[in-house]
Amino acid sequence: MFDCLLYLILKTCPQPLNAAAMAGSIMIAVVLLGLLLILMWRCIVAAKDRRDYKKFEQAASQANFSGGNNPIYKPATRYYVVPQGFQEPQEPETPLVTTPNSPLFKLSPKYE
């Protein structure tokens, strides 16, 4: 009876797999799949950029600016004319502030 059970175990259970080989092959497959996806993405982006650049070149060649001036550009500098007889405003005279340590501070005779 035990011989029959041993025969069934050996017949249904294959040899154990090498765990390191399985883990290594899975990691290599994941890395290769990632590199393949990155390469595909880069090719798609390069093709789209090429198409967009051709559209840009066509639009730039069809642009019709007179005299090389951009109609949208506004200069950053402004010029103002100062009216005749203009004088700079005078600063108001500030009141003299004294502290007890300053040489200008004097006590009135009433408080000395």
Image (tube, rainbow, N blue to C red):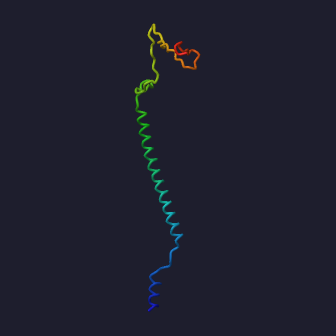
Q: Looking at the picture, does residue 72 appear above or below residue 112?
A: below
Q: Looking at the picture, does residue 21 appear above or below residue 78?
A: below
Q: Looking at the picture, does residue 49 appear above or below residue 77?
A: below
Instruction: Look at the image and tell me in which quarter the C terminus lies.
Output: top right
Instruction: Look at the image and tell me in which quarter the N terminus lies.
Output: bottom left
Q: Please state the horizontal and vertical placement of residue 17, each as a whole percent of the image.
A: 51, 74
Residue found at x 45% / y 16%:
80
Figure quadrant of residue 73: top left
Residue closer to the observer: 74 or 60: 74
Q: Residue furthest top?
A: 85
**So how many labels did they put on this image?**
0
Residue closer to the observer: 63 or 32: 32
Residue closer to the observer: 50 or 84: 84
Q: Residue furthest right?
A: 103
Q: Please state the horizontal and vertical placement of residue 2, each as a whole percent of the image.
A: 46, 90
Residue found at x 42% / y 38%:
56
Residue found at x 49% / y 65%:
26
Q: Please state the horizontal and vertical placement of residue 93, each as a whole percent of the image.
A: 49, 13
Q: Please state the horizontal and vertical placement of residue 3, each as a whole percent of the image.
A: 46, 91
Q: As drawn, is 104 to the left or to the right of 62?
A: right
Residue found at x 44% / y 10%:
83
Q: As drawn, is 106 to the left or to the right of 2?
A: right
